[in-house]
Image (tube, grey):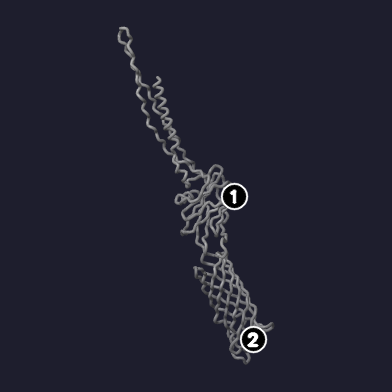
Amino acid sequence: MKQLCACRSVTGALLLTALCGLFSGLPAHAQDDFRRAVPPPGKALVFVFRVDREPLAAQVPVIVNREVIGELANGTFVAATVSPGPTQLRIGQRLVSALSFVATANESYFVRVEAIAGQTLVRTVATPVSEPEGRRSLAQSRFVGVAPAVAIPPVVTPPVVAAPVAAPPVVTPPVAAPPVVAPPVVTPPVAAPTVVAPVVVTPPVVVPAPPAEPPAMQPTPAREVSVPTEPGRDWDFALIAKAGAFKMANDNQVVAGLQTTYDTTSSSVFGVEAEWRHEAGFAVGGEVFSYKNDLVTTGATPDAQQEVLAFMVNGKYYFRAASWFYPFVGAGIGVARATYSGGLKGDATGLAYQGLAGMEFRFKPVGLYLQYKYLSSKTGDVGKEVNVGGSGILAGVSIIF
């Protein structure tokens, strides 16, 4: 009997060892699969992934609630655990896309980021997407960010069944015959102990329930924010050469005491501008503008010619309609000098101001420039002024440095 009990004890110990090995053998690599991560209890999980239509090499930083969680290249993603409540995302380096929403506990949120080449900087567009679309994109992306306290569903491995251990043979001691002469004593055979087969316990396979569809986010519209990091990096310098048609506003005036008729259609109309342009759209610079007009007096003075040279300081604002199309408006102030030749000799100077509007088609480093100009100026002494202003349309080429 003692030997039988010892046999059963050995069998039970081996069975217990096999079961312990079964429940401790789950794979550890499942903890690294962030694509299937679900939020920890009482928290929310935010996935941010980048998919460019035209791949760019620039890295895009991702900031969640003022904490940098990683930098995205095309085809990568990051994840962050946040507390329920208002959540803010800032994506980009100098042109930043901002996204705000209210996170709900135990929900996952997915945001797609696209990097777009700008005039001088890379700008980003952040768009919330549904979980099915987000999961599909994560399956094709590489994880590059840190995701603290992310819960990952365990991967259950089928149990390993330990082979049953054969019981050791039972040795029965011989029974001695009594010393008296008697009929032989027949010893009944000892029955072999019954071996109980080990019971294999299979742990239940837990299939995580699909997460509920997160509530629809109501993001604030993405806005571009210029964040200067180094002085002078946000400015461009441009030179503009232009020519076109210009027409004076008055054709009959008194010049040098003589009633004079002008040919209002100007000739030799050209101008040169130099300006500094800021990334935000405004620009400042200087301009030299010149044009000529013929005039005929009613007296004995023969034909003469008037040449106007204006020196202006301009301010403009360029509207970014597209990465290559920039309408603009502007104004300027300066002085205009009229010089007379032919039948009249002399010159006169006066204050000048102008209004500007137009558009520029930019294909760096060269652009096509179209401008409408209204110039107002009177030259000469008080009471003897000559109105040399007018309006016109000019076209030209810009070179951006």
Q: Residue furthest top?
A: 181
Q: Amino acid at mark 2?
A: Val
Q: Secondary structure at mark 2?
A: strand
**Looking at the image, residue 268 lies above or below residue 360:** below
Residue picked out by circle 1: 86
Residue 161 appears left or right of 71:
left
* Distance from Cα at disc 1 to Cα at disc 2: 73 Å
- Crowd class of label 2 (few under 14; some 14 to 19; many from 20; radius 10 Å): some
- Give the mark toward the camera: 1 or 2: 1
Which numbered circle lies on residue 255? 2
- Crowd class of label 1 (few under 14; some 14 to 19; many from 20; radius 10 Å): few
> Which of the two residues, 179 or 166, is positioned nearer the viewer here?
179
**Looking at the image, residue 166 lies above or below residue 97:** above
Q: Residue furthest right?
A: 383
> Which of the two residues, 47 or 164, is positioned nearer the viewer here?
164
Coordinates of residue 360 in the picture (x, y in percent): 53, 70
Question: N-terminal of the two: label 1 or label 2?
Answer: 1
Quadrant, the N terminus: top left
Q: Amino acid at mark 1?
A: Pro
Q: Secondary structure at mark 1?
A: strand
Res. 182 image quadrant: top left
Q: Residue at x 57, y 58 (%)?
A: 223
Res. 294 image quadrant: bottom right
Coordinates of residue 256 in the picture (x, y in percent): 65, 87
Q: Is residue 218 visible?
A: no
Q: Residue at x 54, y 44 (%)?
A: 106
Coordinates of residue 276 in the picture (x, y in percent): 57, 69
Residue 65 appears left or right of 161:
right
